[in-house]
Amino acid sequence: MFILGLRDAYGLRIAIWPFLIWHVYFFAALYVGLAWLSLVLLAISVAATCYGSFLLCKHRADLIFSSRFAEEHGFPSNPRNSQLTFGMHLAGFLLLFLAPLVATSVESMPPALADKMPFMYAGFLFGLPGVVGLIHHFVRRFVNHGLKQSNFG
């Protein structure tokens, strides 16, 4: 995940807030069990991730990455790499994030589900980079499309 490859204070400050908000969403949805609260926290998490991704795209030249791979992962230089990272994030989202999301949407947590909470949290942690990567992919495309239109339009 490219956000983990950021090495400057600005990039880390932008990246930490969506992760904290996603964790608040996960634990509140899991333990409170209110469907409307889960949806509100999900919307806030997606909005925070979009905003953080927009700021990363806007200040791309100022970001310092730990490696060329991390930079290429976050901001692919060619369409082939963009397709590969999109596929990787989509796979992580589908395999690891949807199951905990569906499980946390239940009204109340039954005892059998409480026993599986560490596995749900592990799936959430492994799936979260996929969700953030997908959101970043679409925000990056939107920002790049806007830049192309403003430069050539």
Image (spheres, rainbow, N blue to C red):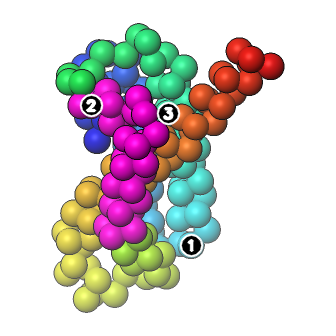
Q: Which of 139 and 68 is in front in this view?
A: 68
- The amino acid on which the numbered mark 2 sits, given as a three-letter code, is Ala
Report helix, strand or loop for mark 1. Answer: helix
Asked whether 75 falls inside the magenta stretch, the response is: yes
Please state the extent of the stretch shown in magenta in the rendering: 69-96
Q: Please identify the quarter of the rendering in which residue 37 is found.
A: bottom right
Is residue 24 at all visible to an observer of this figure?
A: no
Rounded to the nearest whole Å, what is the CA distance between mark 2 and mark 3? 15 Å
- In the displayed structure, 52 sits above or below 92; it is above
Q: What residue sits 22% from the left and 63% below the top?
A: 122
Rounded to the nearest whole Å, what is the CA distance between mark 2 and mark 1? 36 Å
Q: How crowded is mark 3: few (under 14 residues within 10 Å), some or many (20 or more)?
A: many
Q: Residue 53 carries which label?
A: 3
- Which residue is label 2 attached to? 70
Q: Please identify the quarter of the rendering in which residue 126 is found.
A: bottom left
Q: What residue sits 54% from the left and 34% below the top?
A: 140
Q: What residue sits 33% from the left and 70% below the top?
A: 95
- Horizontally, residue 98 falls left or right of residue 142, namely left
In the image as oriented, which residue stretches furthest toward the top?
62
Q: Residue 35 carries which label?
A: 1
Q: How crowded is mark 1: few (under 14 residues within 10 Å), some or many (20 or more)?
A: some
Q: What residue sits 53% from the left and 64% below the top?
A: 38
